[in-house]
Image: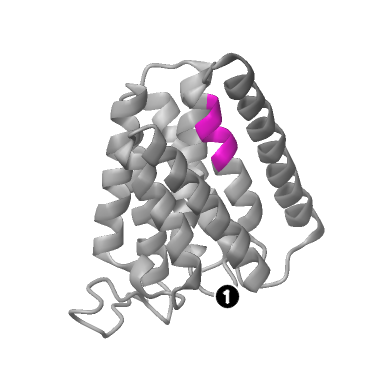
Amino acid sequence: MKGTTHLAIGGAIGAAACLYYPFSLEHSALYLSIACFSALSADLDGPSLLSGKLGKLSRILRNLALWTGIGFIAAFAYLYFSSDKTYPIFSTIAVAMFILGLITKEGTIRNALVSLVGIALLYFGWTSTQQWLMGFGLFVAWVPWLKHRGMTHTLWALVIWGTIGRGLEQQLGITGITAVAVAGYASHLIADTLTPSGVKWLYPLYKKSIKIH
């Protein structure tokens, strides 16, 4: 299924979370970012995350997300190293936007860039003793080199993603992050199950694709 479809579903999940949970601008931005990122993250694997040609608008949105993420990450890094101030909610959004900007790239260079981001997150998680961030960094660093629709499109990956989301929820103290992360990731697997190729939900225990079409 097209990445734009996954993104639209993720956006709908994020919007539903904004309506369901107590509203605040920060929390709403976080729900939307996590939902959209989770809906696309299963496609971090393979040589081309959102395989297919990008339209002009899609390319503009990709570059906007990429450079906005870079700008915010640089600003938050400066504030952290210069005054030891942290902004966990906005930092999470910035990292999600940056990786989303890389999602429509393809090839070895893109894989290497995503892996470098993952390694940086893993290191920061280790130095700050945040286990969920270490798990997230390991996921981001590892999966770009996997076969498309392999391990990232399984029930086990969904459980791992939910565990990462739960850790982030506990870190930020914001109810609903786990549910939004799981719903976003699950939406990707369910949507791909509706395609002719299907999804190997139980791989490697059961190697045949499960499909509904």
Q: Closer to the camera, 208 or 90? A: 90
Q: From the image, which quarter does the C terminus lie in?
A: bottom left
Task: Name which residue lies at 37% across and 16% down.
Answer: 22
Q: Is residue 171 above or below residue 183?
A: above
Q: Tell me which secondary structure the magenta stretch mostly adopts.
A: helix
Can residue 176 be spotted in the picture? Answer: no
x, y percentage for residue 34? Answer: 46, 40
Q: Is residue 72 above or below residue 193?
A: above
Residue denoted by label 1 = 47
Q: Closer to the camera, 36 or 195? A: 36
Task: Name which residue lies at 63% across and 34% down.
Answer: 73
Q: Quadrant of residue 13?
A: top left
> Magenta span has 88?
no
Task: Name which residue lies at 69% across and 40% down.
Answer: 70
Q: Is residue 137 above or below residue 166?
A: below
Query: Mark 1 belongs to which amino acid?
Result: Pro
Give the extent of the magenta segment: 90-95
x, y percentage for residue 212? Answer: 32, 75
- 68 lies left or right of 178: right
Task: Name which residue lies at 29% across and 67% down.
Answer: 154
Near mark 1 (Cα within 10 A), the count class, few <14, some 14-19 or many ≥20, is some
